[in-house]
Image (cartoon, rainbow, N blue to C red):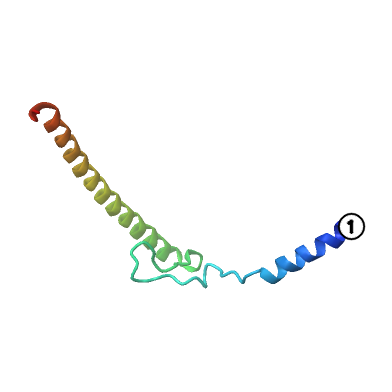
């Protein structure tokens, strides 16, 4: 039973070092940061508001994806152009 005598200080230490955890609703979200937005509780919305929220979210995601594809396409075109230049037109 020496296990119990060694186990009690371990449990006391864990209990004393435990920190208070914040819930999703208590977290601070910076409004100036584009990566995060305010938390929206969709469970409290009416069905009409929820449909509007879904439509807005889909449109925002579509715009973001389009921007990413355009940037990626421009960069890949530039990289391919540089590679072709060095392969065929650049002489040592």
Q: Crowding near pointer 1: few (<14 within 10 Å), some, many (20+)?
A: few
Q: Which residue of the protein is positioned furthest toward the front in this rendering?
A: 92
Between 32 and 88, the one lying in front of the other is 88
Label 1 sits on residue = 2
| Residue under the point 22% across and 47% down | 71
Q: Above or below — where is 45 with respect to 78?
A: below
Between 50 and 61, the one lying in front of the other is 61
The answer to which quarter of the image holds residue 50 is bottom left
Between 72 and 87, the one lying in front of the other is 87
Q: Quadrant of the C terminus?
A: top left
| Residue under the point 47% across and 64% down | 42
Q: Quadrant of the N terminus?
A: bottom right
The answer to which quarter of the image holds residue 73 is top left
Instruction: Determine the secondary structure under disc 1.
Output: helix
Left or right of residue 3, residue 78 in this image: left
| Residue under the point 56% across and 70% down | 22
Number of marks in the image?
1
Give the x, y percent position of residue 33: 35, 67
| Residue under the point 44% across and 67% down | 40
Left or right of residue 53, residue 11 in this image: right
Give the x, y percent position of residue 31: 36, 71
């Amino acid at each position: 039973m020496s296990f119990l005598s060694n186990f009690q200080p371990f449990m006391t230490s864990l209990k004393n070092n435990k920190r208070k955890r914040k819930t999703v609703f208590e977290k601070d979200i910076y409004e100036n940061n584009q990566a995060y937005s305010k938390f929206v509780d969709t469970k409290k919305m009416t069905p009409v508001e929820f449909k509007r929220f879904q439509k807005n979210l889909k449109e925002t995601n579509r715009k973001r994806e389009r921007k990413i594809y355009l940037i990626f396409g421009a960069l890949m075109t530039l990289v391919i152009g540089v590679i072709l230049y060095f392969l065929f037109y650049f002489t040592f």
